[in-house]
Image: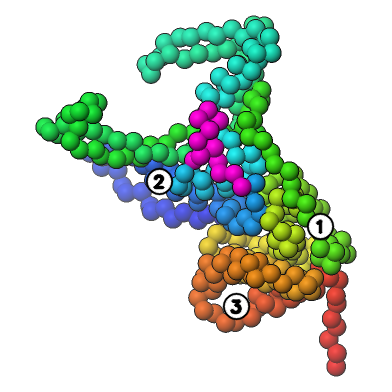
């Protein structure tokens, strides 16, 4: 759960000449930044890891536009990957509607198009048997912004021109538009061919640790995201076959299971049950606990992979910096990680006189 505390000054006393409030239009930079921050906050609220912590494959495919079949580039790759869809195919609302209409007509269905003028040009609506055509983006689906550079051309007098021959200066500016994943659409066939999953065999020692965990959370494989959700006490994982290795799968599952030990029905750890805000010490400590606990479990299962360790180190580096070189907190996190690993393995230690 994330709580945001926004300070607010006391309103100034009203005067006769109160300045008129103006609404500031957000820049594209701010829109994209807000999007990333929201994704991070949503991840915290759902008990998920940061959206870029993905040691599983996206089937080797960069996000691609449905119409042009060209790959998105730059920050768009990050923005689209972090949405968690398995298909790399994205399209605009209009592209989705037009593609669904085309496919419906190819199947012999009668789709009627009606156009009307708008101040931006014309707008088309489609009906089938007198009812609005349902194909295209599904109802209530939310789009994802992608950005692109455009250019303003200036002539020798500094005036804007569309004539490339008169252009002596080009000024770049950033624009954005909204796209939807094809999994958010009805009636549109994906041109992307889904590859077969890798034929990994589960690591028996790791699988045994998971199956023997007492009071375990429910584990699902419903979407291509790894997270623990405290509200439903559920761990979701991408399928084993989309990971680069079985070791990566089990390490990621261990990470989420360690998070789950913080639930009120288990170890009741503040980093899971308390109020946690992204970037806070509680959040950083909980991520440290989860990764340290996962490393301990990997050691028990005999998983010793340098690439796996490199991924873990890179992921932790950002959170460790938040500990402000506080050795006491690091020691506490290590102790909690040990307790979590012991809980998962059903090991109990009793104090002796």
Question: Is label 3 in a helix, a strand or a loop?
Answer: helix
Identify the residue shown where x is 84% and y is 81%. Answer: 349
- In this view, the mark in front (3 or 1): 1
Furthest toward the bottom, the residue is: 353
Residue nearest the viewer, comparing 273 with 135: 135
Specify the quadrant that holds the N terminus: bottom right
Q: Earlier in the sequence, mark 1 or mark 2?
A: 2
Q: What is the magenta range?
A: 60-72
According to the image, what is the colour scheme of the structure? rainbow
Quick check: is 67 in the magenta stretch?
Answer: yes
- In this view, the mark in front (3 or 2): 2
Identify the residue shown where x is 56% and y is 34%. Answer: 90
- In this view, the mark in front (1 or 2): 1
Q: Report how far apart the C-alphas of labels 3 and 2 lie in the structure.
A: 34 Å
Name the residue that disc number 3 marks: 329
Name the residue that disc number 1 marks: 201
Q: Position of residue 304 (x, y in %)?
A: 72, 72
Sort mark 1 into few (<14), some (14-19) or many (20+) by Cα contacts within 10 Å: few
Residue nearest the viewer, comparing 154 with 279: 154
Q: Earlier in the sequence, mark 3 or mark 2?
A: 2
Q: Position of residue 323 (x, y in %)?
A: 54, 73
Specify the quadrant that holds the C terminus: bottom right
Q: Report how far apart the C-alphas of labels 1 and 2 lie in the structure.
A: 45 Å
Q: Position of residue 328 (x, y in %)?
A: 59, 82
Identify the residue shown where x is 64% and y is 39%. Answer: 87
């Amino acid at each position: 759960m994330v709580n945001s505390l926004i300070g607010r000054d006391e309103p100034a006393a009203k005067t006769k000449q109160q300045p008129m409030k103006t609404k500031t239009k957000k820049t594209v930079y701010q829109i994209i930044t807000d999007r990333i921050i929201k994704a991070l906050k949503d991840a915290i609220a759902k008990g998920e890891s940061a959206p870029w912590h993905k040691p599983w494959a996206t089937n080797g495919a960069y996000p691609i536009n449905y119409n042009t079949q060209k790959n998105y580039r730059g920050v768009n790759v990050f923005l689209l990957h972090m949405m968690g869809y398995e298909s790399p195919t994205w399209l605009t609302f209009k592209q989705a509607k037009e593609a669904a209409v085309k496919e419906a007509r190819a199947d012999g269905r009668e789709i009627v198009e009606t156009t009307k003028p708008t101040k931006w040009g014309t707008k088309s609506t489609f009906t089938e048997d007198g009812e609005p055509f349902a194909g295209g983006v599904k109802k209530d689906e939310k789009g994802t912004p992608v950005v692109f550079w455009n250019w303003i051309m200036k002539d020798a007098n500094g005036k804007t021109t569309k004539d490339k021959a008169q252009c002596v200066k080009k000024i770049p500016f950033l624009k954005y538009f909204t796209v939807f994943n094809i999994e958010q659409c009805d009636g549109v066939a994906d041109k992307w061919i889904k590859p077969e999953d890798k034929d990994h065999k589960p690591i028996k020692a790791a699988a045994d640790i998971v199956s023997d965990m007492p009071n375990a959370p429910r584990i699902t494989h419903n979407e291509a995201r790894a997270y623990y959700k405290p509200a439903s006490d559920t761990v979701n994982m991408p399928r084993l076959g989309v990971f680069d290795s079985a070791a990566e799968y089990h390490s990621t599952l261990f990470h989420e299971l360690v998070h789950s030990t913080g639930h009120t029905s288990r170890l009741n750890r503040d980093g899971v049950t308390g109020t946690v805000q992204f970037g806070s010490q509680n959040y950083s400590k909980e991520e440290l606990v989860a990764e340290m606990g996962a490393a301990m479990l990997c050691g028990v299962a005999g998983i010793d992979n340098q690439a796996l360790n490199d991924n873990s180190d890179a992921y932790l580096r950002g959170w460790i910096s938040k500990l402000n070189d506080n050795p006491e907190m690091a020691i506490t996190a290590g102790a909690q990680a040990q307790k979590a690993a012991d809980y998962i393995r059903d090991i109990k230690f009793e104090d002796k006189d």
